[in-house]
Image (cartoon, rainbow, N blue to C red):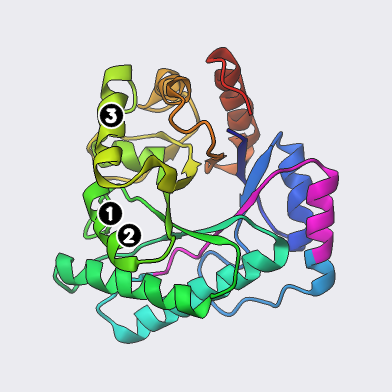
Amino acid sequence: MRIGCHVSISGGIEKAPRRAADSGCECFQIFTRSPRGGNPPEIEKSAAQKFRSERKRLGLADCYVHTPYIINLASANPELRKKSVAMVARDLERAEAVGAAAVVTHIGTAAGSDRKEATEKAAASLREITAAARGIKARLLIENSAGQGATLGDTFEEIARILDKAGADTGVCLDTAHLFGAGYELRSPEGFEETVRSIKATFSPGRVGLVHCNDSKVEKGSRKDRHEHIGLGTIGTEGFETVMASGVFDKVDFIVETPPSGSAADVKKLKSIRRETSRSI
């Protein structure tokens, strides 16, 4: 279990590893383009090489890439779905250029269509992405949601249905704030054990390739996505102690996605929890 946070690529993607190291990261996450989408600038070969060499020099382990927020792989709008597929496939190529381990994407929303039909579209989109990105080593991970509105992926069962139909080795990124918002318990050992049983009943824990480790501003089952700094939200320090002490995700990296002004403190806090629960890298 390595711990890190999301860092900016402002001023050039090659500057991200230094920012990650300065935040106390052991691994880190970036956008390779604007989170709002649009046509991204090319990643120059020299910048990619500098990124790789800096990461190695600073002793940073894996890097992860997050796709823009506008992606909807389940869209009822064929043009938007086509653009979303192209964007994710392109981000896999960009992740490969900098040596990232995986690309994380939100699934999208069923707004405007039947939910079952939307999951079919999402799975078809993932198949198209896999075909377009054949030969790329970076793994694709779909992120669970808190279930706000018609957003897909708030239950393990729905994620499993999409994965089963996607066919390829698409993995999962579990966000703790999203899990909590969707109604899954993390705070007590008994509650978390029930959550883990639900995972095992639908897809293998080995399918989880990353954990987005965020506290929540809202209550369990709120179906809202509101990140809070570690230990200051409704999941609380005890919740993260429970997750880390369980050993379920010992071989999975943890990435904090909280406001940059406090993310280094969150990384430090998680390292302390890891140490106290006797879990090491």
Corner quadrant of residue 32: bottom right
Instruction: Classify mark 2: helix, strand or loop.
Output: helix
Q: Mark 1 points at which residue?
A: 160
Residue type at mark 1 is Ala
Q: How far apart are marks 2 and 1 (CA)?
A: 5 Å
Q: What stretch is highlighted in magenta?
A: 49-71
| Contact (Cβ within 8 Å) of mark 2 with mark 1 | yes
Residue at 35 percent of width and 86 percent of height? 79
**Direction from residue 192 to residue 207 in the image, left or right:** right
Instruction: Classify mark 1: helix, strand or loop.
Output: helix
Q: Name the residue under label 2.
A: 163
Q: Name the residue under label 3.
A: 185
In the picture, which quadrant includes the N terminus? top right
Residue type at mark 3 is Glu
For the residues carrying marks 3 and 1, which lies nearer the camera in this image?
Answer: 1
Residue 170 spot, x, y in % from top left: 43, 60
Viewer-side residue, 159 vs 222: 159
Q: Is residue 41 above or below residue 251?
A: below
Q: Distance between the residues labelled 3 and 2?
A: 23 Å
**Direction from residue 231 to residue 201 in the image, left or right:** left
Residue 58 appears in view: yes
Residue type at mark 2 is Leu
